[in-house]
Image (tube, rainbow, N blue to C red):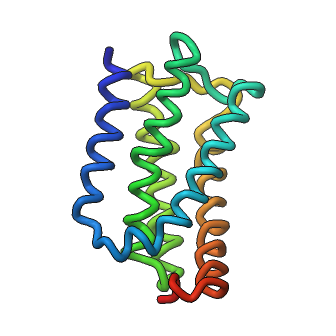
Amino acid sequence: MVPALIRLGLVLISGGSLIFLPKKAFYKYLPVTIFTSVLVLSVCALSIPYKFWVVKGNKTNKVLNDFAYVFGSFFAGTLWIFHFTYGKFKHFVGINFIMDFLLAYPLNYVFQKFKVYKLVNFKSKHIFLTYFSFSFIIYGFQLLLEKCVPYFKR
């Protein structure tokens, strides 16, 4: 029951925060956010054959877990981080470092404690290194997008 409440909370709180995001920022950073979601979903897909983590219950629980994470906190977080830091690379990297560290260590501990998931062949350092490396990829994606599509220029 607690894992379901945590999943629901991730989606509702993260998604609810987006009503405060300016509409222009939402549309400007939506493509990079979707790209980020694809990257994170790729890790989730790889977690099945490589047993990065397990979720108690059936495959539906795993899918719900992954989708709550990807389309809840990660989706909203990407939009907010880009809104506040894009164009200030050092700030962008610093905020991503802090957020990925919090996810990999204290939040990961809490999620495992409440049995949202259990890491198997993935450790906290892997979470941190994977998602922190994604921050450089997605920043480059947004730069490329701005260069190629005039609508997305600063």
Q: Is residue 145 above or below residue 78?
A: below
Q: Is residue 70 above or below residue 88?
A: above
Q: Quadrant of the N terminus?
A: top left
Q: Position of residue 139 (x, y in %)?
A: 59, 73
Q: Residue at x 66, y 80 (%)?
A: 144
Q: Position of residue 16 (x, y in %)?
A: 25, 50
Q: Position of residue 48 (x, y in %)?
A: 70, 26
Q: Residue at x 26, y 55 (%)?
A: 17
Total number of numbered labels?
Answer: 0
Q: Is residue 19 above or below residue 117?
A: below
Depth check: 26 or 92 in front?
A: 26
Q: Is residue 57 left or right of residue 140?
A: left
Quarter residue 42 falls in: top right
Q: Is residue 98 above or below residue 28?
A: above
Residue at the top extreme?
57
Q: Residue at x 24, y 59 (%)?
A: 19
Residue at the right extreme?
49
Q: Residue at x 42, y 77 (%)?
A: 85
Q: Is residue 18 left or right of residue 150?
A: left
Depth check: 128 or 23 in front?
A: 23
Q: Is residue 121 left or right of residue 13?
A: right
Q: Position of residue 74 (x, y in %)?
A: 46, 50
Q: Is residue 16 left or right of residue 151?
A: left
